Amino acid sequence: MAEPSNLELVQIVAVLGAGVIVAPLFKRAGFGSVLGYLAAGLAIGPFGLKVVAAPEAVLHFAELGVVMFLFVIGLEMRPARLWGLRRDIFGLGATQVLTCGALLTGLGMLAGLAPATAFIAAMGFVLSSTAAIMQILDEAGETATPPGQRAVSILLLEDLAIVPLLALVAVLAPATGQNLRADWVSLAIAAGAVAIVVAAGRWLLNPLFALLSAVRAREIMTAAALTVVLGTALLMQVAGLSMAMGAFLAGVLLSGSTFRHQLEADIEPFRGLLLGLFFMAVGMSLNLDVVMQQWGLVALAVVGYMVVKAAGILAVALLFGAGRREAIYRAALFAQGGEFAFVLYAAAAAVGIFDARISAVMSSTVILSMVLTPLTVMAARRLLPAEKPDLDGLEAPDGLSGSVLLVGFGRFGQVVSQAFLARALDVTIIDNDPGMIRSAARFGFKIYYGDGTNLDVLHASGAGSARAIAICVDDRAAANKIVTLAKETFPQAGLLVRAYDRGHALELVNQKVDFQMRETLESAFAFGQNALEFLGLAPAEAEETIADIRRRDAERFCLEQTSGLYAGLDLIHSNAPTPEPFTRPRQAATPLNTEAGVLAGEALRREPSPT
């Protein structure tokens, strides 16, 4: 069997190439990159094209991706924020683990497993895949949302749970009984390792990184970041704890450091690559021989464990006050087993709790559940209706009229409204963010709840009698849809539209709106003028410079309307370096005739404009 350090170059190229090709295709098709990596691993593994014959070598190395992933998560979790999640971690997380563990243990015993075997099989499956769930949340942009933070809290508790579970494996081992002293020694070693990490993070790491940053060598900082992550993981592994939890702890301790963003930037490329390799290694590890030979048992195990675990998660989520949509989505997200199951099952096999058959079946069950998770999550997102917002105390538009209809009361719309209100115009304002509407009410604004992309809402808001519709939403697609509806249904109203960027502004011009304005244009002009004055330029000169930039921008915009987005690039002041000749000319150029001399003189007099 090939060792990780002796993997042939062709295998390395095959692994990387398969990930590069398959993962983007799956993500583009809407299945997510996780399923793509799993499929790529299965394709080149020992039960596919047999390019890689020893997936355990890749898996052992790629587990460092999970370690680095937890370190990056830790960097985002300041101790105060972590303390704020304590109820979700030790309340929601512990309840979910204990409830699902009890249900799955009962299911295993009903299937004929011995109590100790059923318990370890259940608890291994209870520990969901941190890597898979965090990748799915990250790709969907849901990590920072309240439901995403609750999911992170549960994952942290599950990562912590691996420690007592490994201790329980030793206690439940058939031949043990006099090992209590050894267990206490192991716990003391683990506590000592945690104390060392905490002490190093508090008093050693910040001074160390400050010293290294003074050297101004980027590669040294990268090496130091990798040393911290891998060194902490190694210490935790030696102490019998989870490498991932050690890396997370190191990240938390460095979350308040001034070097946090630098560390995250240094680790990020390694994290992404190794995490992809981890999922590929999981796909390679799926033993299709066991699946084919025991297909009935494996299928029943996958369906049974996932359904029962999902039911337990759903019940706990509802008990803790989650909405129906969040509860079902969490059940779909957490219904699989995870990478820690392999650690727990290996320990159980080593002490005789699992025989070879049970170990193979349970490992295949966990892997297949991880493969199915992206599909169950995708199905949940498509089938679940969006949760209805809390509209208590909000008023929907009905039979309104006014000279101006303002759609969208975000940071842009709030400023725009002042111009209308200053002239005592009759303005109707609608927005679809309940929180924004309630917040605006505290400042004396009357905002109606309504979605401007809905034609009925526009009618109810008085668009049919409005002289102008000011579209101030910060969503490009929504703005375009409102423009289309208004042009078709309310031709009497002028359309004044907030443009997202230059390309959107060109779209709006093509749609023949009455007025469009890029959302950052004027503020950027004002910022630039004040910056020049701050740097010592006379106010008149600064104003003249910005006037010239404004003229160039308007001229370029006109060219783009006829010739595309890349027209008029010579009107932009660029910081691209000007090519210099290898050798300077020894004498000045002499024009061939009078006309050439005149043209050359005019070119020299013109202000140079880089392309």
Image (cartoon, rainbow, N blue to C red):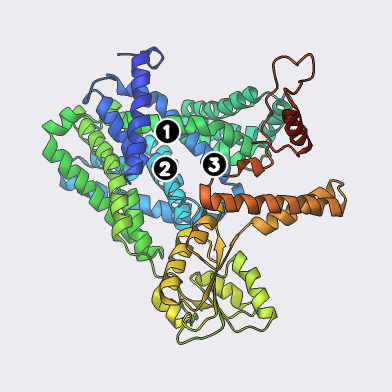
**Residue 5, percent from left and from top:** 41, 14
Please report the residue visible at 56 percent of the width from the left and 54 percent of the height from the top. 501
**Residue 486, percent from left and from top:** 45, 72
Mark yes or no: residue 611 visible: yes
Mark yes or no: residue 182 visible: no
Q: Where residue 540 is drawn, which disc sits there? A: none
Total of numbered circles in the picture?
Answer: 3
**Residue 157, percent from left and from top:** 44, 46
Disc 1 target residue: 275
Q: Where residue 135 is drawn, which disc sits there? A: 2
From the viewer's perspective, is 213 left or right of 567? Answer: right
Q: Are marks 2 and 1 in contact (CB under 8 Å)?
A: yes
* Label 2: element kind: helix
Q: Are marks 2 and 3 in contact (CB under 8 Å)?
A: no
Above-or-below relation of 17 to 339 = above
Please report the residue visible at 61 percent of the width from the left and 36 percent of the height from the top. 198
